[in-house]
Amino acid sequence: MRILIVEDARKLADLLRRVLSEERYTVDVAYEGDTGMEMALSGVHDLLILDVMLPGKDGFEILKAARAHRITAPILMLTARGEIEDRVKGLTTGADDYLIKPFAMEELLARITALLRRRDRELDVAQQLHVGDLTLDLTRHEARRADRLIELTPKEFSLLEYLMRNAGQALTRTQIINHVWSYDADAFSNVVDIYIHYLRDKIDRGFDRELIKTVRGVGYRLEKPDKA
């Protein structure tokens, strides 16, 4: 599990990083809102922890932008302010939970566990992903287009799953690398192009409609059936 913390109080942010790392989470930290916004919109995190009061973009702005960009990861808001208006604003904007500073670390860990468990239950409801006539069965680890069974390697399967979960959205090579491979995108960006080529050969070859599109200057997108 990969967690993003956006918190300008460095001692608290570094403490959270250490505690969560000890709980075997992969942790990324941003100390101000503009960097936090960029990292939050990368789409690679399983959970976001956002402080409300930040230099640059505040937590509410990051929250709103994340939901507008269809980031579905649970979002936990942190704030030193206890006014009910702030809690209502966060929850109605798309936050999943709210924790007021100061808080016990045990309570934070319990809320993170609950949020991730809830997310896993929601993901388990749908064991298949569908985009047009393309189906990905997450239980059987199978892919089909129309009635054709498509053999995929584990990495091809992971790449296709990421594309299908973000169907209609342009994904950069960096986003894909960070989600599917989890290593330095600058050094290995060509691996995305190679695996996209493999997928196209298996997913699109022989069909009238191509689903995997190149977005010039950005990366790639899996086309939704209602798009031209």
Image (cartoon, rainbow, N blue to C red):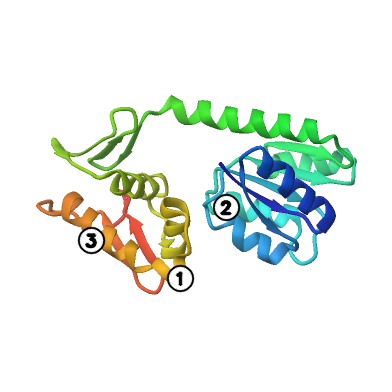
Residue 192 position, x and y percent, is 34, 62
Amino acid under label 1?
A: Asp
Question: Badges 3 and 2: C-beta atoms under 8 Å apart?
Answer: no
Give the amino acid at mark 3. Answer: His
Instruction: Please tell me how crowded label 3 is: few (under 14), some (14-19), or many (20+) other residues with Cα within 10 Å.
Output: few
- Residue 9 appears anywhere in the view: no
Number of other residues with Cα within 10 Å of mark 2, as a class: few under 14, some 14 to 19, many 20 or more: few
Mark 2 or mark 1: whose residue is earlier in sequence: 2
**Residue at disc 3, secondary structure:** helix
Please tell me which residue is depicted at 69% across the width and 56% down the height of the picture.
Answer: 29
Measured Cα–Cα span from mark 2 to mark 1: 27 Å
Mark 1 element type:
helix
Most foreground residue, 113 or 168? 113
Q: Do the residues labelled 2 and 1 touch (CB within 8 Å)?
A: no
Name the image quarter holding residue 214: bottom left
Pointer 3 or 2: first along the chain:
2
Tell me if mark 1 has few (under 14), some (14-19) or many (20+) residues whose alpha carbon lies within 10 angstroms of its own.
few
Location of the N terminus by quadrant is top right
- What label does residue 68 carry, if any? 2
